[in-house]
Each structure stands twice: as C-alpha cells, then as structure tokens.
Amino acid sequence: MPALLTDTPVDQQTAATAQPPRKRWTRDECAAMESVGLDLTRYELVEGDLINKMSKNWPHVAAVALLHGWLLRVFGIGFVVQEGPIDVTPQDNPTNEPEPDLLVLKRQIKEFFFAHPQPTDIHLAVEVADTTLTFDRKTKASLYARAGIIEYWVVDIRERKLIVHRDPQNGAYDSVAVYDETESVAPLLAPGQEFPVSTAFQS
C-alpha cells in the first residue's frame, strides 16, 4: 500500500513551515473600519500590515521626549510633530501610512490641517527603536528612501547609538553613519546645531 502523502518527511516539513494567508490592508479599508467605530489609533499601516505600536517603555518615552525638546529648540514649536501620519510615494501610499516618532517639517504644522505632509515637506524623520530596530532600519528605511525623505534618524536604545541615514537614491540611503553616545551630529538643515547623542539616553 503506498504511503499517505501526509506521511512523507517533505510534507511534514511543509506543514510545519506553511504560513496562513495574510490580509494586505489599504488606507481606504482602514478608513472604512474607523468610520464604523473601530479604533486603530494604536496601529500604523506599513507595507500593507497593521503594525501595533505597542505600549512604550520608559527608555522609549524618555528618548522621544528628550529628542523632541532638542528639536523644538532648534527648529521651533511650529515645525516639530510627534507621531504624525505622512504620505510616501504615490505607489506606496495605498498600503502605507507611517507615523514616525518625530518629524521636522519645512512648513508650519498649521498648514497641514487637511492633508498629510508630503516627503518634500519633511526635513527629518526620526524613529526610536527598542524591539523594532530591524524593522526601522530595513522596512521603514526603505520606505522613507523610496519617498526621497532627505534625512532619517534611528535612535537605537539598547546599543545607545544614533543611526543617521542620508542621500536617498534608488530606494535606499547611500549614506548610513552610526554615532555612539560620545559623539554629536548636526541635522542637514541645521548644520550649526550639534546634537549630542547622549542627550537621547538616560544616564
């Protein structure tokens, strides 16, 4: 009697590693869910996935607050946004609505009451990463580079480093530099203002 198909080692391995079908979400579908009362405020849409922004731990909260305060002093209260949704490329927009931890805008916040900031409106996008470091360095970096966002910072809480992405070309950042907590770096649009990396971390 021939062996059953499910008895073969190959099929056992396939069954063990098979992934269930995934739903790829769009902005329109998310808006429809919110219109009927579903709360999606804890999620952001990235590459068709609804990403749970999760509860923030204290190092994350502190790093965002400290960097937010520094950016406000440098760029002004009307130009710095915390967790604001943005547009990316026209091709990526239907399945993406990222919300960087911090944004520095070229125009005042009051000009965006009725529309998301476009990539050309953004001086700097910042993500603060603890458990999300790989996601922020790969998935979000690629998304922001494709959009042409000129400068993108990732604060690596665990290693106490700042990863600075610049010069977006062909869907990737040509320049990626890592600064440790003994170093400083100035944003491209404020070359005279050095940010001490240690400012983002608790002592």
Image: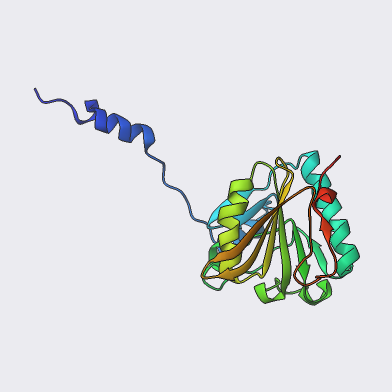
Residue 48 visible? The answer is yes
Q: Is residue 87 left or right of residue 111?
A: left
Q: Position of residue 30 (x, y in %)?
A: 60, 58
Quadrant occupied by the C terminus = top right
Q: Position of residue 183 (x, y in %)?
A: 78, 53
Q: Is residue 111 left or right of residue 42?
A: right
Residue farthest to the front, as pictured: 182
The one of 69 and 18 positioned closer to us in this rendering: 69
Above or below — where is 31 with respect to 169?
A: above
Q: Residue at x 83, y 45 (%)?
A: 62
Q: Residue at x 60, y 59 (%)?
A: 141
Residue farthest to the left, as pictured: 1
Q: Position of residue 130 (x, y in %)?
A: 69, 43
Q: Quadrant of residue 144?
A: bottom right
Q: Residue at x 15, y 25 (%)?
A: 3
Residue 27 visible? The answer is no
Q: Is residue 6 left or right of residue 71?
A: left
The one of 84 and 203 positioned closer to us in this rendering: 203
The number of numbered discs placed on residues in the rendered structure image is 0
Q: What colour scheme has been applied to the protein in the rendered image?
A: rainbow
Q: Residue at x 60, y 53 (%)?
A: 137
The one of 1 and 149 positioned closer to us in this rendering: 149
Q: Is residue 11 left or right of residue 55?
A: left
Above or below — where is 188 with respect to 60?
A: below
Q: Position of residue 95 (x, y in %)?
A: 54, 62
Quadrant occupied by the N terminus = top left
